[in-house]
Amino acid sequence: MMDAPLTLTHLLDRGARLHPAKEVVSLAGDGSVTRIGWAGVRERAARLAGALLRLGLRRGDRVATLAWNTHRHLELYFAVPAIGGVLHTVNARLSPGQVARIVAHAGDRFLFADADLVSLADGVEGLEARVVLDGRPPVPGWQDYEELVRGATPAEPVRLDENEAAALCYTSGTTGDPKGVLYSHRALALHTLTISLPDAFALGERDVILPAVPMFHATAWGLPFAAALSGATLVLPGPRPGADLLASLLEDERVTFAAGVPTVWWGVLDELRRAPRRLSRRLRIHSGGAPTPAALVRGYDDLGVEILSGWGMTELSPVGMVCRPRAAMAEWDEERLLRVRTSQGTPLPFVEARVVDEEGRGVAADGRAAGELEVRGPWVAAAYYPGAGGETEGGEVGPQAGWRDGWLRTGDVATVDAWGYVRLVDRTKDLIRSGGEWISSVQLEDALMDHPAVADVAVVAAPDDRWGERPVACVVFREGSVPEDPASVLEALGGRFPSWWRPDRVEMLGALPRTTTGKVDKKLLRRLVTPPSRET
């Protein structure tokens, strides 16, 4: 066989060559819309690549972005890897301090940011160039993206090894410290092909794809790459799209596939109920990043819209499972089928999954026996970005912590049934997942301990219909220092974290429950803060 490397340059080349006029629809914050064909995206990406080379980009250099879902961000998705650079999409929901630490750890040389996100980079040092993507009027100290692209000579893609790095994403670890995952061209190319399969997202040239998941979040689940490969129409909703805008785009652009976290689809469901739209009969929605509630599935069923659930992690590039009921399940009753539809599904081709006990032995595939979910495959990370230490349950720290015998330990507790469908039932880690984004309980606890009235504190997750989970602070006050308003201790968080990290409530306790080893018993705390009606 020929030795043809699997690289991202092929994806855009194919889309531009076979479907040059198929549109990328890009919305701006002022409501304006840009429509550009795939051939135009390739031409602009080539000019951007030339501009990056003129700025001094070298092979392996990291290029950071702080950007929303727009055509300019899409151009960076392809231009940076095409010339051997590494695209580092930085989460725009982080605080300036967190952004500065992650950019420094990654060693980024260049930063591209949307104008409304420029302030997040105020504390970033050591950059050789800063470029504002939509700078009208110009932002002091920043170069203008359009001027940069307009004055550049298009660059030809370089010959790449498929195992070279193409993108870098960060996720939180058990200690809350950032952990980087470096994606290779090969991993992303295989991931793109596989999520497009009929029993995955079933994507093709006739589709209109709307990524409601941000492009700064694990490459928008690979959808920009899949749209280019298939030549599908791609709809990019711009900065901070609300439920009303997403609902309108579903109708106006005749969207056939959309993806985002359950929080987003709750809001869109409410909007569609309030103001019904004429949706495509081919519309299906992928709900990921957090478990999909049965009520959400039923709500979209009432509208005649298929909703798919799934599972993934930043460490999996990021999709690992998609839930598609088997043909043999067509005769099942609604409740039995609903249980399957709200599971995390079955592993994608080439991804292997197992559920094991503490000794690494497989548990029974009966849908009841629980263990830790472990995975391996060609787009599963084999280690964290150098210097970004993971941590195992046993306390081991290092770039390869969190792996066992070649399997990634996900930290998720799951069951698997006889059909191979995996269902998450708990987590071995104490991170809180709110609206598809992680919140570090450890970092919040450390900050709350700075309050003079706090003697002890633990932050745990409480179930929430809209966000999936929300943080609750369980506080032990110092004797004689109980404030009139217990929630006032949250002032200790100040501006150190994004506003959505702030716990929803404070629970006063006489003492924190602890295990026999002296650790805080967070499992018991979660039960204490969960209303009886929500316990399972």
Image (spheres, rainbow, N blue to C red):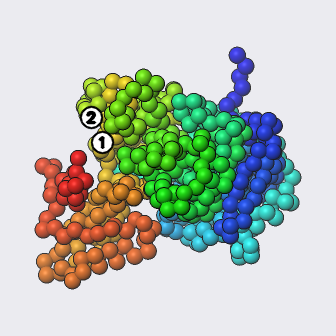
In the picture provided, is 249 more to the left or to the right than 18? left
Q: Is residue 343 above or below residue 172?
A: above
Mark 1, residue position: 425
In the picture provided, is 215 more to the left or to the right than 310? right
Mark 2, residue position: 370
Residue at (23, 47) in percent of width and height: 536
Q: Is residue 284 above or below residue 251?
A: above
Q: How far across and down, in percent of the image, does residue 217 sit?
A: 54, 52
| Quadrant housing residue 476 | bottom left
Q: Give the residue type at disc 2.
A: Ala
| Quadrant housing residue 81 | top right
Q: How far across and down, in percent of the image, does residue 423 sit?
A: 35, 37
Residue at (22, 68) in percent of width and height: 507
Q: Who is closer to the viewer here, 182 or 201?
A: 201
| Quadrant housing residue 453 | bottom left
Disc 2 is placed on an element classified as loop
In the picture provided, is 119 more to the left or to the right than 482? right
Which quadrant holds the N terminus? top right
The earlier-in-sequence mark between 2 and 1 is 2
Q: Who is closer to the viewer here, 310 or 9?
A: 310
Q: How far across and down, in percent of the image, does residue 499 sit?
A: 43, 70
Q: How far across and down, in percent of the image, does residue 40 sit?
A: 81, 49
Residue at (17, 75) in percent of width and height: 478
Q: Dots 2 and 1: beta carbons under 8 Å?
A: yes
Q: Label 2 to label 1, Cα distance in Å?
A: 8 Å
